[in-house]
Every structure is written in structure tokens, then in C-alpha cells.
Amino acid sequence: MRFSACLHVTAETANLVQALKAGGADVLLCASNPLSTQDDVAASLVKHDKVPVFAIKGEDNKSYYSHLRAALDHKPVITMDDGADLVSMLHTDYTDLASNLVASMEETTTGVIRLRALERDGALRIPVIAVNDAATKHLFDNRYGTGQSTIDGVIRATDMLIAGKRVVVAGYGWCGKGVASRARGMGAKVIVTEVDAIRALEAAMDGLEVMTMKGSGAYR
């Protein structure tokens, strides 16, 4: 089966692509976010696994969309998306492919929101699995994965000591929980801002300080 995947081109995605290929799939990969592309991973998949990869770290807008078109020119029967850009293009410039698609999979909250808007308008042409709604996605990827990678990114970018710092986390969804947990684990004083009363109460019950954005001093 022909797969076209528009995902973060990282070592984790490479494992997924290798598993699909080992199962007999004809896989093509392009980047859902040029800023996260690991060029060495892309090169390794091409050289060692013979997987076509259309991704360059920091690619411009023109290259990004040309890579999306390359993914759809692959004539997939299954697509995998992170942000719904691939499926959105399918609904505009590649509508003739829709009848051949078995299904798509969407990874992110943003993408699921876009696709549900299409569904409400009666415009969604293919079935889509909302991977983002899976319990394991919330529990492991969003909470622990995003929690750790966000703190790691801050440390790498600033060389900052987290212990003793005041960290304001805007929103206490699954990603916010992860960031708050990792920051507190490294000794930060964590403040949560949250417009949803139940989530705000949950943060308070988790032992975190809950404030308004203005009260938290996040603008200073």
C-alpha cells in the first residue's frame, strides 16, 4: 500500500517509517514543520532505507508546498498528517485522489480542528482517524513528550538554570500539564493561568499556583 506521510522528520518518525516499510508499504515522507527536520535522519532514510524524503531543515514556503505536492503525486491510498496541510491540499488541488484514499490519520489538535470544520460543512471527502484523540497520545506524547522537549528547548536556547525560576504555563491541557510537571521537577516555581474553571481547579489541586495572566507577571 502506498503511504504518504507529512510528519516531523525526526528519529522517532524514522522508526515509524521503517516499521511501515518492513511491513511491505511503499512510503514517502515529507516534513510537516521545516524547523523540526533533522537533515541527517532524512539522509539516512534515503540512503539506507530507500525511502523518498522531501524535507530540508528551514526550507522556505515554496519548497514546503512543492514537497506536499510530491507527497500527493505519490498517489497514496493512506496519508498521515500533522497539521492537516496534506489533506487540505487534497481537498483543493488533488480532489481526484480522494476516491482512491482508504483513510488518513491526523496527529495534532490543530489538524483535527481543521478537519472537523470540514466535516461540519459536509466537505470532508475521506475518513480520518483522529490520532490526537487517542489516550496514549494525550498521556505520553502530549504530556511527557511535549513536557520534556519544551523544557529541553528552553534550556538549549537560553542556557538557563531552571531551579528557582518562575515559570508561567498558559493553559493546563495535556501539554500544559507536562510542561508544568517537568518545570516543577527541576525546581521552578510554577504558576498556571487557565480560563477553564475545572482545569484551573485541577492545577490548584495538583499543588500549583493559579493566577490570571496579568497577576502572574508573565508580561514583565
Image: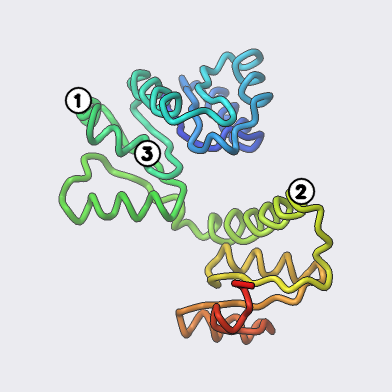
Query: On residue 85, which mark appears?
Result: 3
Q: Is residue 97 visible?
A: yes
Mark 2 or mark 3, earlier in chain? 3
Disc 2 is placed on an element classified as helix
How crowded pointer 2 is (Cα within 10 Å; few <14, some 14-19, many 20+) is rated as: few
Residue at x-position 48% and y-position 83%: 198
Q: How far apart are marks 2 and 1 (CA)?
A: 45 Å
Foreground disc of the pair 1, 3: 3
Query: Within 10 angstroms of label 3, few (less than 14), some, or many (20 or more) residues?
Result: some
Q: Nearer the viewer, residue 26 or 121?
A: 121
- Which residue is the site of mark 2? 156
The mark that comes first in sequence, 1 or 3, is 3
Determine whether the residue tagged by mark 1 lies in a helix, strand or loop: helix
Front one among 2 and 63: 63
Give amino acid for label 2.
Arg
Discs 2/3, front: 2
Point out residue 166 in the picture as x, y percentages from the top left corner. 73, 74
Kind of element beneath mark 3:
helix
In the rendered view of the protein, which quadrant contains the N terminus? top left
- For disc 1, the marked residue is 96
Amino acid type at circle 3 is Asp
Name the amino acid, label 1. Asp
Q: Does residue 219 lie above or below 83 as drawn?
A: below
With 215 as the anchor, is 90 left or right in this view?
left
In the rendered structure, are the residues bearing label 2 and label 1 in contact, judged by CB atoms less than 8 Å apart?
Answer: no
Residue at (46% x, 31% y) in the render: 5
Residue 113 shown left or right of residue 145 in the figure: left
